[in-house]
Image (cartoon, rainbow, N blue to C red):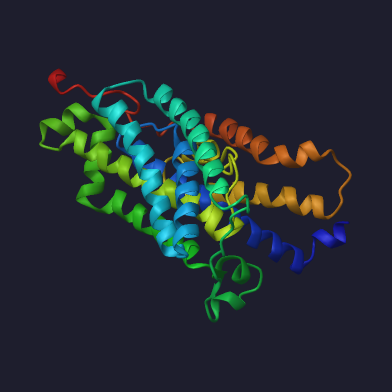
Amino acid sequence: MWNDIFNLAFMTSFLSAAVRMAIPLLYAALGETVSQKSGTLNIGLEANMLSGAFFGFAMAYWTGSLTLGFVGGMLGGALFSMIHSFLSVYLRQNQSVTGTALNLFAAGLTSYLFAVMVNNTAGEYPQVDTLETITIPLLSKIPLIGEAFFNKDIVTYISYMLVIAIAFFVKRTVWGKSLIAVGENPQAADTVGINVFRTRYLAALFNGLMCGMGGAYLVLGQLGMFSENVTSGRGYIALSLVVFGRRNPIGVFLGALFMGAANALQFKMQALNIDMPIQFFTGLPYIMTVVVLLLSASRKSTEPGGLSKPYIRSMR
């Protein structure tokens, strides 16, 4: 068994699967990172991803275009994110309760809409083609990491660029510093002329678009089909990655790879017929989520000062 594990072919295949499974988590976690830096905690990432998965799949199925599918997925995720933002930012409702409620609502809504969709296809289970692989010359030939990182699809490559772009935006731009100011002290930010509500709405919109992209990628880039609760808790896992990555895009990227590896490991271990209960394999990603949170608890918090606190302008 150990000879099967510790060889280049297995490790290359394992790392490639880890990257592949990390991408939906990465998109959602990057979106939530920006949202939390503005002071908004959105526990409804599961709703954003699930709606993105359904609307992305439905759009791709009915139009035959994966591009339109991803657009539909992003808009679906943005819709739920903006509902959360309206309730928590404008109406100042509890952000955690609002996000949890939206998760439940999205699960029921997408299940119902998918049942309607299947009925309209005469009972035939709808499927779509997935994204094609684009091989990057030279880089894809690097041993071990070449196949894993540079023999992927366009959405995966875009995620690499987003990590760098968001890190630069937050650290090096005026808009990024305004975002951080709103998250740390909205009263002070408002005093110097930064529109707190607009900043939080825009951050929520970006969060929804990214979560929708992650959900759409799950069905259009990997599975080629939709099923009830297809995200299977990935929104919650992405939420833990934001904490684990210390709200830093690079840290979030590494955390996503770690959780992607945990997901890939369960399938690889099953393929090797390791004599362990099947429940252990299926529960491995969630066990690792708990481990991630425990590791994060031992480090200094990077939580913005105004996170999850409603802003009332008259309190200046």
The extreme top residue here reads 315
Along the horizontal axis of the image, is 75 left or right of 47?
left
Identify the residue at horizontal 47%, vertical 67% (top origin).
154
Identify the residue at horizontal 65%, vertical 51% (top origin).
261
Q: Give whichever of 167, 107 is nearer the camera.
A: 107
Q: Is residue 158 above or below residue 276?
A: below
Residue 100 coordinates in the image, percent (x, y): 46, 26
Snapshot quadrant of residue 198: top left
Snapshot quadrant of residue 152: bottom right
Along the horizontal axis of the image, is 119 left or right of 106?
right
Residue 2 coordinates in the image, percent (x, y): 86, 57
| Res. 309 in view | yes
Number of on-image labels:
0
Identify the residue at horizontal 84%, vertical 61% (top origin).
4
Q: Which quarter of the rendering shows the C terminus?
A: top left
The extreme bottom residue here reads 137
Residue 289 coordinates in the image, percent (x, y): 61, 36
| Res. 300 in view | no
Snapshot quadrant of residue 292: top right
Along the horizontal axis of the image, is 288 left or right of 84?
right
Residue 249 coordinates in the image, percent (x, y): 42, 49
Q: Which quarter of the rendering shows the N terminus?
A: bottom right
Q: Give whichever of 235, 114 is nearer the camera.
A: 114
Q: Is residue 38 above or below residue 257?
A: above
Q: Is residue 76 above or below residue 98?
A: below
